[in-house]
Image (spheres, rainbow, N blue to C red):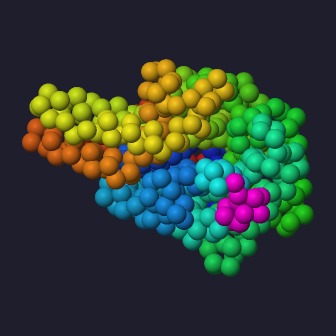
Amino acid sequence: MTPVHEIVRRIIALHSQGVRTTLLAVCPNSDAVLEAAVKVAAEDQVPMLFAATLNQVDRDGGYTGWTPRAFVARMRELAERYGCAAPLYPCLDHGGPWLKDAHTRDRLTLAQTMAEVKASLTACLEAGYALLHIDPTVDRTLPPGQPPPIEVVVERTVDLIAHAEAERVRLGLPPVSYEVGTEEVHGGLADFDNFDRFLAGLAAGLKEAGLEHTWPCFVVGKVGTDLGNPVFDPEVARRLYERVAPLGSLIKGHYTDWVENPAAYPAAGMGGANVGPEFTATELDALRALCARERTLGLDSGFEEALKAAVVESNRWRKWLTSDEAGRDFDQLAPERQEWLVATGARYVWTEPRVLAARARLYEHLRETLPDPHGVVVERIARNIQTYVKAFNLQGLLPLLGQAT
């Protein structure tokens, strides 16, 4: 049994004893977020998952600048720096066709995008990823908004898992864990009938392919939250949990950012939850506070202006436009929407040269009165991460996992 699946098995065992916990998956959308998460894992002695999308981390460096190998190396470097003895698990998030923005932008065919995803799966395995999220629930060959049939989702899921397993064996690597499904409505997994059909089809497909041993430790379910809705539905989560726990799996939620009731996650049996854009916003808030401090010194690094310009010129903010905003230029949007899009899109441009240069100037301007500006930013993110650690009952989990059978 893989390390992540073993933790899932023990969490299910703890549930029978009345002990509920939810694993936190931090999306490593910047170096500061990754550092903060490792710092929290070290200080609180909690296991931590790192769910990296192909937009963030990929063979081309993604928007973080990390390849899978570089990402894992950086995680391990930070673990050594902070003396982290808690387990850290690098994971792939949303590994599927057209889920990397460039695949949609470049209008790749199904064959082309599947080939790209398979090459990235191999790179993740070579880098030492512990968990692969297989998510073929988008099909750009269909009319907008039309999901692929469940049977097609199952077929492509099995195909991608089969590729990963063949590559893992070829490379002589130990077993990895899998996560399947999506919380997106377009994936067709938003209602219980489709959810059950997907599970039954997946079980049959894996058995036919001789891949029963790859049964996923996490199944992603739509539990009420998305980037615009912070309300978690514990009743839906409980019903989904009751379906997958007997199979040895747990439900994982995505878009947990700013969720109003995080303490309800463990109580409902949720096994894991992804948080990403919220930590970007926290990083930005910390940097803006430093900019305000900089202004009291009569200095100006130009950081906020450089960041906004980089976000606007990236055009990646367009993916978040509502239907009534489509086609508008950035400056035609309402001020509050512009602010939200900058905060959400900042993660795409943290490594843009002019943003890096402005951030370096900001830190330098503050150095005499604030010896470690970067440490201030990391600590602010770490405090945010700790709110989820506490709400998810992760503190003190490692000894309990050791006792679970």
**82 left or right of 336?**
left
Q: Position of residue 24 (x, y in %)?
A: 53, 42
Query: What residue do we see at 9% from left, 42% from top?
Result: 368
Q: Residue furthest left?
A: 368
The magenta segment: 107-118
Task: Examine the structure image and report whether residue 109 is included in the region drawn in magenta.
Answer: yes
Q: Is residue 320 visible?
A: yes
Residue 212 lies, with reference to residue 86, above or below; the image says below
Taking depth in this image into account, of 257 and 143 the one nearest to the observer is 143
Residue 353 lies, with reference to residue 320, above or below; the image says below
**201 left or right of 41?**
right
Residue 353 lies, with reference to residue 59, above or below; the image says above
Task: Examine the structure image and report whether residue 364 is included in the region drawn in magenta.
Answer: no
Q: Is residue 7 visible?
A: no
Q: Position of residue 175 (x, y in %)?
A: 66, 67
Taking depth in this image into account, of 262 and 283 the one nearest to the observer is 283
Taking depth in this image into account, of 45 and 218 the one nearest to the observer is 218
- The quarter in which the N terminus is drawn is bottom right
Q: Position of residue 253 (x, y in %)?
A: 64, 37
Query: What residue do we see at 46% from left, 21% from top?
Result: 336
Instruction: Assign the magenta stretch its main secondary structure.
Output: helix
Taking depth in this image into account, of 152 and 225 the one nearest to the observer is 152
Q: Position of residue 201 (x, y in %)?
A: 88, 50
**44 left or right of 61?**
left
* Residue 240 position by quadrant: top right
Query: What residue do we see at 27% from left, 30% from top?
Result: 289
**238 left or right of 142?**
left
Query: What residue do we see at 58% from left, 68% from top?
Result: 123
